Amino acid sequence: MTKSTDLRRPLGFIALVAMLAALSFPAYAHGDAKHDKQAAKPISTEEKPFGREGDPKKASRTVKVDMSDKLRFAPDSLTVKRGETVKFVVKNNGKLMHEMVLGTMQELKEHAAMMLKHPTMEHDEPYMAHVAPGKVETMVWQFTKAGEFYFGCLVPGHFEGGMVGKIVVK
């Protein structure tokens, strides 16, 4: 091997490490970053089993949801009418990161298991509110189908610790 070959290997390795580090940086976005759903993107029309993103101008009511480090939501249950658009004002009264994620129980369990394996996974959907300690976030959702749905905190260990609530859509 010549000296130039010896130098290229370490430089190539350093370049590869730098590129991987740059590409993995967004994976840490789940942390304390503020997610501003209404600023840059239009309202999604994607239909989920539990409804779709709601238009804030059409919200029929506002529901305040408090989260605590006791791994509980208050209130932990809610009844809404089919078709109703609800603005959730989600406050984190704790010192830990918390989130409120809407879904079916199966979806929440699957997502919670994925979060245990990949705790820094980036995700920002209209049915999620990631709330830093002492902060408040909003989420607007239209419940288009009748049934029982849920909300949970999918920060690793929180859902498993009982941080889950129920929504009945009539």
Image: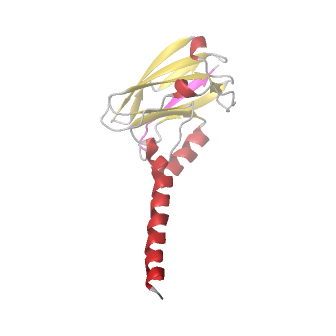
* Residue 18 visible: yes
Which quadrant holds residue 168?
top right
Is 94 magenta? The answer is no
x, y percentage for residue 49?
A: 68, 32
Which quadrant holds residue 142?
top right
Q: Which residue is depicted at the point 48% across and 47% down?
A: 26
The type of colouring in the image is secondary structure
Q: Is residue 126 above or below residue 80?
A: below
Task: Specify the principal SS of the magenta part.
Answer: strand
Q: Point out the residue furthest to the bottom here.
A: 1
x, y percentage for residue 48?
A: 67, 32
Of 133 and 1, nearer the camera is 1
Q: Point out the residue furthest to the left here.
A: 95
x, y percentage for residue 155?
A: 43, 43
Of 154 and 23, nearer the camera is 23
Q: Which residue is depicted at the point 59% across and 30% down?
A: 149
| Total numbered labels placed on residues in the image | 0
Is 162 magenta? The answer is yes
Quarter of the image with the C terminus in it? top right
Q: Which residue is depicted at the point 54% across and 24% down?
A: 38
Of 12 and 113, nearer the camera is 12
Q: Which residue is depicted at the point 51% across and 54% down?
A: 23
x, y percentage for residue 74?
A: 41, 25
Q: Which residues are magenta?
A: 160-169
Which quadrant holds residue 14?
bottom left
Q: Left or right of 98: which side holds 170?
A: right
* Residue 118 visible: no
